[in-house]
Amino acid sequence: MATTPRISSQLGERIDDDIDLYRAFAEKNFRERKTNPPHTVRYWAYLLRDEDAADGLSVGRTPKAAVKFLSRNYGYGSIRLRDITSLSNDGLHIRLDASDPEHAFVCNLPLLTISNEQRDAAMRIAKGVGAPI
């Protein structure tokens, strides 16, 4: 995945409003395009990578903000904040990027590489978020 350089972010305030958020598709295979919409977001678009573990999964408050830090993107999908946070009782929440109020992070997502239990939780959450777009 190609990204543009950016300053290390700091987590800002928590977002509790039930708003739409946008996840950029950094990889072509994050989205399954169908002949007749709705297209489907594949669950791996919502899996946390090791390099993102410190802040969380990148999302935008607008489509433009979602793709801002990618030098190449393959579109984006939208999801309601409530749909993300309702998938876990382990403190899953959204925080603004302190350096960019239009950018945010899904915090406290389980990381695949920690343990089998964390992998199972990560897969359950990612599959719960992946949806038609």
Image (tube, rainbow, N blue to C red):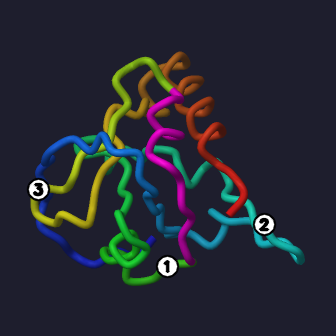
Which residue is at the far bottom?
71
Asked if residue 23 is positioned above or below residue 75 in the image, the reply reads: above
> Is mark 2 in CB contact (under 8 Å) with mark 1?
no
Label 2 to label 1: alpha-carbon separation: 19 Å
Q: Can you tell which mark lies on residue 38? A: 2
Between discs 3 and 1, the one toward the N terminus: 1
Q: Which residue, given by chain and number where applicable, does mark 3 sit on?
A: 98
Residue 86 image point, x, y percent: 50, 29
Q: Quadrant of residue 65?
A: bottom left
Q: Which residue, given by chain and number where applicable, does mark 1 sit on?
A: 73
Q: Amino acid at mark 2?
A: Pro
Between discs 2 and 1, the one toward the N terminus: 2
Identify the residue at image location x=62%, y=29%: 124
Q: Amino acid at mark 1?
A: Asn
Instruction: Please indicate whether residue 76 sits to the left or right of residue 17 in the image.
Output: right
Residue nearest the observer in this picture, 45 or 97? 97
Q: Amino acid at mark 3?
A: Ala
Instruction: Please indicate whether residue 131 sits to the left or right of residue 88 in the image.
Output: right
Instruction: Please indicate whether residue 118 sits to the left or right of residue 28 in the image.
Output: left
Is residue 76 on the magenta stretch?
Answer: yes
Label 3 to label 2: alpha-carbon separation: 34 Å
Instruction: Please indicate whether residue 81 sits to the left or right of residue 61 in the image.
Output: right
Is residue 6 on the magenta stretch?
Answer: no
Between discs 3 and 2, the one toward the N terminus: 2
Q: Quadrant of the N terminus?
A: bottom left
Q: Can you tell which mark lies on residue 28? A: none
